[in-house]
């Protein structure tokens, strides 16, 4: 690795001195965990900033999915997307449920609602759609199916901080949304995540699960685990939160710049986004074939530019951990999609270089 390498993403970070100022209070109080004051402040400010009723901050996004499944007491089959990160499936299986894959809409890259009902069996207990790259799923269609069949809906909203739905945060959709504050996300706490629900009883249950099943009197009242966010992570989240609107606007502008420059290339396509319901936290480009994509990737690598094949391979093909279920559209898209570098500190000059290499590679 050299100092000139350009990676697919870099964390958006507040000035170090602002983070250090928050850490001084942590050192003075001597409280590092157990729902400390900064965790509580972080939850409150996130709720206000993103117009969320309430949220439960946790130590990572995978735990957030597990907590959602546990809080809803699910046992059985959970329908989900094959075009996602493996953590979606890992969380389902860790909670004793079975993932059932339903193929994607190759334009939106999200689960195709028209295919969901055919996958429902007597063992189906929930649908877990993924807002892929922060692009909103077809909420109304999915939740209508869930109501019809008495199923729960958990959104894997790992990418969706800052995505809105009809004037409110997309995180308030479904029974529970599980999001991530990982270093690569629009808002980061280095590692972290959250569960969001508008149901007060579920919210309280999630808080208990996060802390080993303790209630407010410190009695163990249900099965839980250690999902707590630390004060150190919350401090970073508070420092970064102030810049979230600026970061989102920057990514959207750079996304648009890339798209405008590349859209005329033969065979190139982009994720379909409707009504601006996306946070533009990634820059996925779909190439006409895997061979073309691999050539472009190789040419970029020669200039120390390292895009990434999100998500490759399609998770339904991970036969070491799941039984193969055919999802041809997801498998096809996964073979020829490439996420280009996109982050707050990425210079426009570098974006122009990337665009130039792609264009010359496809002549």
Image (cartoon, rainbow, N blue to C red):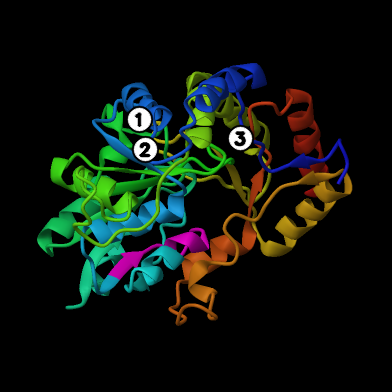
Sooner in the amino-acid sequence: mark 3 or mark 1 = 1
Does the stretch in magenta take in 72?
A: no
* Range of magenta residues: 78-88
The residues tagged by marks 3 and 1 sit, at their Cα atoms, a distance apart of 39 Å
Report crowding for label 1: few under 14, some 14 to 19, many 20 or more residues within 10 A (C-alpha).
some
Q: Can residue 249 be seen from the camera position used here? A: no
Disc marking residue 352: none
Closer to the camera, 277 or 181? 181
Name the residue that disc number 2 marks. 35
Q: Secondary structure at mark 3?
A: helix
Are the residues flagged by discs 1 and 2 in contact, CB closer than 8 Å? Answer: yes
Sooner in the amino-acid sequence: mark 1 or mark 2 = 2
Closer to the camera, 13 or 355? 13
Name the residue that disc number 3 marks. 259
* Residue mark closest to the camera, 3 vs 1: 1
Report x, y in % for residue 311.
57, 58
Disc marking residue 40: 1
């Amino acid at each position: 690795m050299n100092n000139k390498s350009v990676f697919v993403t870099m964390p958006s970070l507040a000035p170090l001195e602002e983070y250090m100022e928050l850490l001084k209070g942590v050192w003075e109080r001597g409280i590092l965990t157990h729902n400390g004051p900064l965790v509580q402040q972080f939850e409150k400010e996130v709720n206000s900033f993103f117009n969320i009723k309430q949220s439960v901050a946790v130590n990572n996004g995978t735990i957030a999915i597990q907590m959602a499944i546990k809080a809803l007491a699910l046992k059985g089959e959970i329908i989900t997307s094959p075009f996602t990160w493996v953590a979606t499936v890992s969380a389902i299986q860790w909670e004793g449920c079975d993932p059932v894959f339903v193929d994607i809409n190759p334009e939106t890259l999200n689960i195709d609602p028209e295919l969901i009902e055919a996958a429902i069996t007597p063992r189906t207990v929930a649908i877990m759609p993924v807002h892929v790259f922060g692009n909103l799923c077809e909420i109304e269609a999915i939740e209508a199916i869930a109501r019809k069949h008495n199923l729960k809906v958990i959104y894997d909203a790992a990418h969706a901080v800052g995505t809105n739905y009809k004037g409110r945060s997309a995180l308030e959709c479904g029974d529970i949304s599980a999001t991530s504050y990982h270093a690569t996300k629009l808002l980061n706490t280095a590692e972290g995540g959250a569960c969001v629900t508008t149901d007060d009883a579920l919210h309280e249950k999630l808080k208990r699960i996060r802390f080993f099943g303790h209630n407010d009197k410190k009695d163990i009242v249900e099965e839980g685990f250690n999902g707590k966010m630390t004060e150190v992570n919350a401090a970073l989240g508070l420092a970064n939160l102030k810049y979230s609107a600026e970061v989102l606007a920057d990514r959207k502008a750079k996304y648009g710049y890339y798209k405008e420059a590349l859209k005329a290339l033969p065979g190139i396509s982009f994720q379909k986004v409707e009504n601006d319901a996306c946070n533009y936290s990634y820059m996925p480009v779909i190439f006409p074939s895997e061979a073309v994509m691999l050539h472009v990737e190789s040419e970029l690598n020669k200039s120390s530019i390292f895009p990434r094949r999100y998500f490759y391979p399609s998770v339904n093909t991970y036969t070491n951990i799941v039984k193969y279920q055919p999802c041809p559209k997801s498998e096809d898209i996964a073979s020829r999609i490439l996420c280009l570098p996109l982050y707050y500190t990425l210079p426009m000059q570098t974006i122009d270089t990337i665009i130039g290499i792609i264009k010359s590679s496809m002549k």
